Image (tube, grey):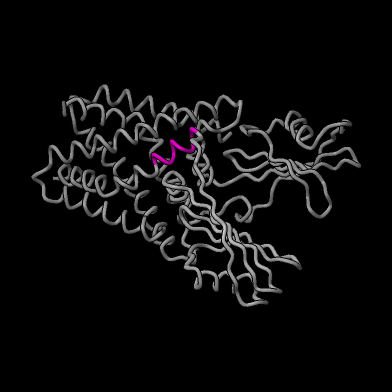
Amino acid sequence: MNHWIRKLHIYAGLLNFSVLMVFGIAGMVVTFDAPDIFHAGDEPRVEVRPFSYPDGLSDKELGAQIGQKLQPPHAGPPNVHRDPINHQLIADFYSVNGLVRARALEQSNQLRVETFRNSVWRFLDNAHATTIAEQTSDSGVRAWAWYTEFSIWSLIFMAVSGAWLGLTERQRFRWTNVSLATGCAVFAAFYLLTK
Amino acid sequence: MIYKLLRNIHLLAGLFALPALLTYAVSSVQMAHRIRIPQNVTEEDATLAPGLAPRAAALQLMAQQGFSGDLGGVLTTPAQTTFSITRVGSRYQVGYDPGSGRAHVKRTDTGILGELNRLHHLHGLHHENRAMNAWAVMLAAVSLILLTIGVTGIYMWFKLQRERVIGAILLSVNLIISIGLLTFLRS
């Protein structure tokens, strides 16, 4: 049986190699706090576009209409809120590439659109967090999310099958048990400390 | 010699990181499938010294009631100060009246699923709670291990002559799909 478990362990690793690298890089990115779009020091790209504001729409509906007009790539539904100072409506469209923020300038029938593009490191961090829970109709995002889903289950399979192979085939190698026991002890200690 | 060394590194690093890797994987499933996290809410009152700033009030509450965690969500109005103290699995939402010194604490506990979820999001070395910083160090170690077992795994596969063809096909499928999708998403 171990022959087939090993084969499947290898195949799962090869099929998910790059996504697991993305998971690993994402962990390093957040540990070392790679600057996000608001702290990177880059000015957003700003443009002002004409936009006619229909009467009788709620803020959420207006946000959806702005989304239809702008079509921000790979973004889901907007997060709609109002500027607490001047009460202008703001629609935030988040995507793996950062943020497109549309500010409604209703009196002049315009939209002020700011595009904050993130670094490649933050892009990879966002990619790792793109799961099938994502609310989007973008086919690229959906495809990536399903690949991530496959990789999550593959990671579970590889962790369990790898431990099985190690414990059954390398039992005589003293460090096998030491490593697992140390890992469990360190994990338990950190878990209890954070609680 | 190199093969043997890398095989040992692959095995030992993987076994060491096993509990943490499973924590991240299981919490990923919870988030991806929106599995509901049950919450247990309890409320209690406490008396603090009057006239305290939010930070001082939080510290006194921590010392007095044994709470621990990160202070956040500070909001001050003339009538009341609110803030939260958050740690893995628990959140204390506090309303403090500086005039009388009375504090009302709403405690929310989230159980094991909630704890795994919080652990997944716990990162960075900026926490006041040292245990949280220690966990962040572990996240870095696990991330590094994930990268290491990926690279050593590729090397070990390449050395297996009989798996080269099918392995090359699978790796190519992986690289073409993932790099293609990432390039498309970055566009």
Residue pictured at 18% horizontal, 46% vertical = B8
Residue A131, above or below B64: above
Q: Does residue A63 sit above or below B163 in this rendering?
A: below
Q: Which of A163 and B14 is in front in this view?
A: A163
Looking at the image, residue A91 sits to the left or right of residue B176; the answer is right
Q: Is residue A70 above or below residue B10?
A: above
- Image quadrant containing the C terminus of chain B: top right
**Where residue B153 sits in the image (x, y, percent)?**
26, 38
Is residue B32 rendered magenta in the image? Answer: yes
Where, by quadrant of the figure, is residue A60 drawn? top right
**Residue B7 or A158: which is nearer the viewer?**
A158
- Highlighted range, magenta: B25-33
- Which of the image's four quarters has the N terminus of chain B? top left
Q: Nearer the viewer, residue B66 or A129?
A: B66
Tell me where residue A124 appears, x and y as whole percent: 49, 42
Judge by depth and name the residue closer to the eye, A171 or B8: A171
Name of the residue lying farthest toward the right: A107
Relative placement, left or right, of B50 versus A190 is: right
Quadrant in the picture for residue B51:
bottom right
Image quadrant assignment for residue A167: top left
Residue A145 lies in magenta, yes or no? no
Question: Magenta stretch: dominant SS?
Answer: helix
Q: Which residue is drawn at 34% across and 44% down?
A: B21
Residue A131 position in % (x across, y down) = 50, 34
Q: Tell me how many marks there are.
A: 0
Q: Percent from the top left, x then y, of residue B56? A: 59, 74
* Side of B19 relative to A147 (left or right): left
